[in-house]
Amino acid sequence: MLHASSATRPDFCPRQWVLMDQLGLADPPESIATAMAVTFAMGLAAETLLVEEWTGDRAIGNWICRHCHEQRSWSRKPGGYCKTESIAPGAQPRKHWWKYQQIVIEALGMVGSPDVLFDVGSPEMVLTELKTLNPTEFDKIVVPLPEHRLRTNLYLKMLDASTNPYRSKVNLTEARVLYISRSYGRMNAEWNEILPFREFVIKRTDADLKEALQKAKALELSRKNMGTPSGICDTALDLPAKKCPVCIQCFSGKHPGVVKWPELSV
């Protein structure tokens, strides 16, 4: 299924996805350099610590115990102990070790998993995306990166359009992007303290989502046998085409673009 993180990429092409479906092709294998793999792992570790430890019981979502696999849904971080059939005399019950699991949103032909929902003391929960930055990027950033702003916007739109019973408890007009520095941090004028966090408010702007929604709708229509969608490239010499695994088939003339996604209403 199309993920929101793919739909908001500028090189996302619904035509490529449909042709690969029709031709029975799998995505080409990808390799990640060691340094990048370590960077990803460190970022994930920082985000996990933030949600599961540093924010106390402010994180709202789904939880599963790493020990006994007991689960909680749409709740604060629970407490308690694992249930055991028998405990050795004198032994203490083992405390739950809760792991946060992102909520899953399905709507508008896409699936998405926002990083976390926070209780910030207001009547509604705040959807928040978490990102780690190297010290140089963290020191320079003054506005959220475009891809982060767009994806966070899309999550708000999807949640609003979903049938999720908890959507009325979430602020659907604005969200947050919280950046975590991979170093000591920098002076925060608001708190008069050196902090490794930078927070930005993302106001929901549906107009910015038009292209992503059109492409997602084109993919959805095509998978309902409405025809092959148009692509994002004008010629086989365009940069995305040079990297496309179905470039030859795309420009062979055998698969005319019937679903013109730039003309779809969303």
Image: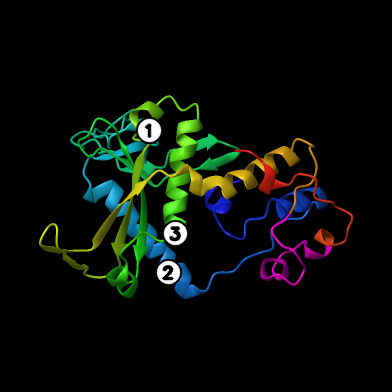
Magenta region: which residues? 231-248
- Disc with the residue nearer the chain's start (1 vs 3): 1
Q: Give residue 16's quadrant in the image.
A: bottom right
Q: Which residue is mark 1?
A: 70
Q: From where the camera sits, is residue 104 visible?
A: no
Residue type, label 3 = Pro
Quarter of the image with the N terminus is top right
Q: From where the camera sits, is residue 152 visible?
A: yes
Above or below, 145 relative to 111: below
Contact (Cβ within 8 Å) of mark 1 with mark 3? no
Q: Which residue is mark 3?
A: 146
Q: CA distance from mark 3 to mark 2?
A: 24 Å
Above or below, 214 relative to 252: above
Residue drawn 28% across the image and 35% down it: 76
Instruction: Tell me if 10 is positioned left or right of 96 in this view.
Output: right
Residue type, label 2 = Val
Q: CA distance from mark 2 to mark 1?
A: 30 Å
Residues 257 and 49: in front is 257
Residue type, label 1 = Glu
Q: Which residue is mark 2?
A: 38
